[in-house]
Amino acid sequence: MLLTALRRLAIAVPTVLLVLALTFTALQLAPGDPVRLFLGPGADAAAAGELRRQLGLDQPLPVQFAHWLGAFLTGDWGTSIAQQRPVTAVLREALGPTIALTGLSLLLSYIGGAAIGLVQAARSRSRTDVLLTALTSVLQALPSYVLALALVLLFAYWTALLGLPEPLRLPAIGAEGISADLLDPWSRVVDRIRHAALPVTTLALIGAAGTARYVRAVTADIARQPFVRAARSRGLGERSVLVRHALRIALLPLVTLAGLQLPALFSGVVFVEAIFAWPGMGRVAVGAVLARDIPVVLAVTAVFAMLVVLGNLLADMAAWLLDPRTRGRA
Amino acid sequence: MSAGASRAMRSLAADPRAAVAMVVLGLAAVAALAAPLLAPDGTELGDVVARRFVSPLGRTPDGAFHLLGTDRFGRDLTLRLMDGARVSLAVGAMAAMVAAVLGAVLGALAGFAGGWVDRGISAVVDAALAVPRVPFLLLLVALFEPGVGITVLAIGLTGWMTIARLVRADVMTLRRREFVEAARALGATPGRILVRHVLPHALAPVLVATALAVGQAITLEAGLSFLGLGVQPPTASWGNMIAAGRDALVVAPWVALAPALAVALVVLACSLLADALESAVAGERTSSAGQEAPQR
């Protein structure tokens, strides 16, 4: 167990280093000279050279990268230009809401996706199957911002226009109401759930579509295996065959799939947070780009990438725990 | 055209998914090409207050008919949509081309050269795949000025990795085949073997991946423009049209819905085309090369 963990970690560390190198390269490609920008166009060459030496910009690029990396690894991520406070402080506030939003969406998309995929596998080639396949194909191709706006239109505006009951009229802005601090604990939980409903549904629906297509394919594949036919021939009901035998095997690749879905999820969350004004890292990044606050954008990209690597690491470990066969390879 | 390729073409022609996709993409392309031919009706808008937010199938006070209604400046949405199609389709196609060429070159290099070249390229592919695309796009846009050029480059430069993986895997198996051995025995140089003998066989999966990449690129361009970080108004792009319509979502939902539906339909068409292409290619592979169809 420990050996496998170390081995996976040994693969993850160079990946993170390469990601940081890629981000550093992107930073170098940007036009504009920070020294000229700082001193203004009228500065003389000697002063510019002096400042360049002070900032370490006269060093070769690999040395600059080493310095930058050293600062990054020790938690010195620079200062936000727009907010005039450490980048780490900005991100600390935003990390929680993003993880809550993506984690909840991933969980719900798995439950929903597995259920849809199983129904399709159980009624393969029926009208339900064809209909659900069409639905999941559309949902999977739908951009997250289009789905999000459609949900806003439906549940924030039209339900109110039509005078539908309160539970169906959902807020479309922020993670909690303006007066959340004044609410009693129970109402505050309800307030939070209502605010999370639309953003979570957007991401969960798109994720569920992908998961459902995958579960359907894998389960159909497994349903043709000899051990499933054996279970059927022993007289087990179709539901028992699918859930007890087929689904258990299908769950394994699903765990790895979770890790692979993370990059797409962290892309969709940027749009969803921007639309719903969710106080997470995606919204911070969009605001930072508009303010040209590059240290913050850089840090958000790096944190998202590290979350992906960490997620894959956890998925690998979970698969290792669940599947005795992978242990032999470790 | 080889027998296998023509068989794949026939199976593609018989696929209803391909037919639907071609109709949608064809209509979008015609709309984009025809946009400059139709005179813009918005040069002199006159009474903007009376003309704006006319609902679909409605008429402005001067009696002009508007199929999809008008936006907040009284501009005809159908014409705006056609104008936006130019940018959205062009950016999508060009960005996908950048990704496909870059992916094919790097993947072929890794698969054909092997050794440390392969290890190096594969490590970069793995690392780049770990970076979520939209946050990295935001970083690239933040470093340069937003605009059409940087949008194409940024989307292309962040989308080549899956194509590189596919090509690498194909080239690795292909270079051990007898016909490559035969070409080598006849004295062909490695470059000629790769370009003339190996790459043509690796094109099919690139085609499938490129169809998907076009859809992704259109989604991303519209998304960036929606956030105000891509194509800048007054140049119409479906993304910045959605953003403009979002402000009027309550009074005039069609202003945002029309471009949103356009993006959704075109992206869906791309993914349908990719599905149909994949089925056709898989059929061709099992029948002509005796290989197993790629498992999904």
Image (tube, coloured by chain):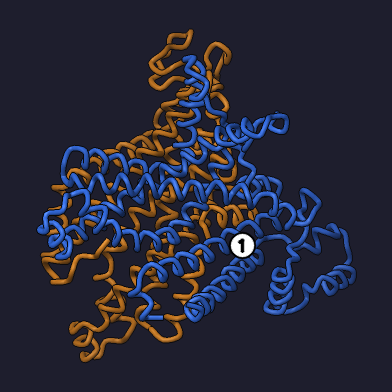
Chain colours: A blue, B orange
Q: Residue B115: x and y, percent?
A: 41, 86
The image shows residue A220, relative to residue B102, as above or below, that is above
In front here: B103 or A106? Answer: A106
Relative depth, front residue between B94 and A107 = A107
Residue B60 on image: x %, y %: 47, 11
Residue B254 location, quadrant: top left
Residue visible at 30% across and 59% down in the picture: A248
Q: Is residue B1 visible?
A: no
Residue B180 point in image, percent of width and height: 23, 83
Query: As drawn, is A244 to the left or to the right of B66?
Result: left
The amino acid at mark 1 is: Ala
User: At which x and y percent is residue A281?
Assistant: 62, 50
Neighbours of disc 1 within 10 Å: few (<14), some (14-19), many (20+): many
At numbered mark 1, what does the secondary structure look like: helix, strand or loop? helix
Quadrant of the frame with the C terminus of chain A: bottom left
Question: Which residue is identified by label 1?
Answer: A302
Q: Say which residue appears at 43% left-offset and 40% top-offset.
A: B86
How many marks are shown on the rendered structure?
A: 1
